[in-house]
Amino acid sequence: MINIIFLAPPAAGKGTQSDFLKQRYNIPHISTGELLREETKKGSEIGQKINEIMISGKLVSDDIVINLVKNRLSMPDTKEGYILDGFPRNINQAIALDKMLEELGKPINYVFYLTIDKDLALKRTCGRATCTNCGQIYNLKFPETMPSKPMTCDECGSPLFVRQDDNEETFLKRFDTYISETEPVSTYYKNKKLLFYVNSGINKDITFNQIISAIDVPEIK
Ligand code: ADP
């Protein structure tokens, strides 16, 4: 089993690295941000509330997120492993996760902490655009990650969209929430000797190589 958690400030590249790992190890990428965005699309009252909270840069209530994760981790495709992106985001969620993983017999193997400067993360957030069809991520502020046709996916030709919370004002709130609520979770995993620091400020291939070199170390017999 390869059971992975990503811990990182907003726009550090959790989603990108999760997709790379999903392809390499054939395990599902579980993003709580995505699960919540799916809920908001249903147009229900609760979906609308979730949307408002996401735009405010605060955290959605633990009960809602913990239930979503519990259901998702109970699915059979997590048998060989999983990549959790965006969960846990506070200590209460970390404790709830430990409990559910013990019940499910799927303990965490690696917690990757992606480090990045706040200014660079802001720049990445404000230029981010995602394909509505295949999920490919672009950045309109960096020539190397721009689509060749404006707002159109190079991979499948579908239109791109910009997330409602990817603007400077919401980013700054998301960053503050990260520092006050999520950052302490790193100490929780450091004490459990599961934490790996990875530099996410250079480029995505360098980040990915650092991650897989931690996973693919040969066992010493
Ligand atoms: P990013 O990490 O780039 O900020 P995400 O897609 O992971 O983006 O999360 C977007 C928003 O979804 C968060 O700002 C928060 O409001 C909500 N969210 C995601 N995961 C959680 C979680 N584990 N607990 C509470 N809220 C969450």
Image: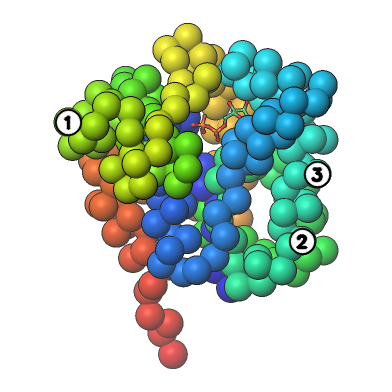
In terms of image quadrants, where is residue 144? top left
Q: Where is mark 3, residue-wise?
A: 67
Which three-letter amino acid code belongs to the residue tagged 1? Pro
Q: Nearer the viewer, mark 1 or mark 3?
A: 1
Q: Where is mark 2, residue-wise?
A: 74
Q: Where is mark 1, residue-wise?
A: 143
Tell which of 136 and 157 is nearer to you.
157
Q: Position of residue 198 (x, y in %)?
A: 36, 48
In terms of image quadrants, where is residue 63? top right
Instruction: Decide if ligand 1 comes within 8 Å of the CB at mark 2.
Output: no
Which three-letter amino acid code belongs to the residue tagged 2? Ser
Q: CA distance from mark 3 to mark 2?
A: 11 Å
Rendered position, 64 above or below 141:
below
Q: CA distance from mark 2 to mark 1?
A: 41 Å
Secondary structure beneath label 2: loop
Which three-letter amino acid code belongs to the residue tagged 3? Asn
Tell which of 18 and 200 is nearer to you.
18
**Tag 1: Cα neighbours inside 10 Å, few (<14), some, or many (≥20)?**
few
In terms of image quadrants, where is residue 68? top right
- Asked whether, in this view, residue 205 is left or right of residue 83, the answer is left
**Tag 3: Cα neighbours inside 10 Å, few (<14), some, or many (≥20)?**
few
- Asked whether, in this view, residue 12 is left or right of residue 193, the answer is left
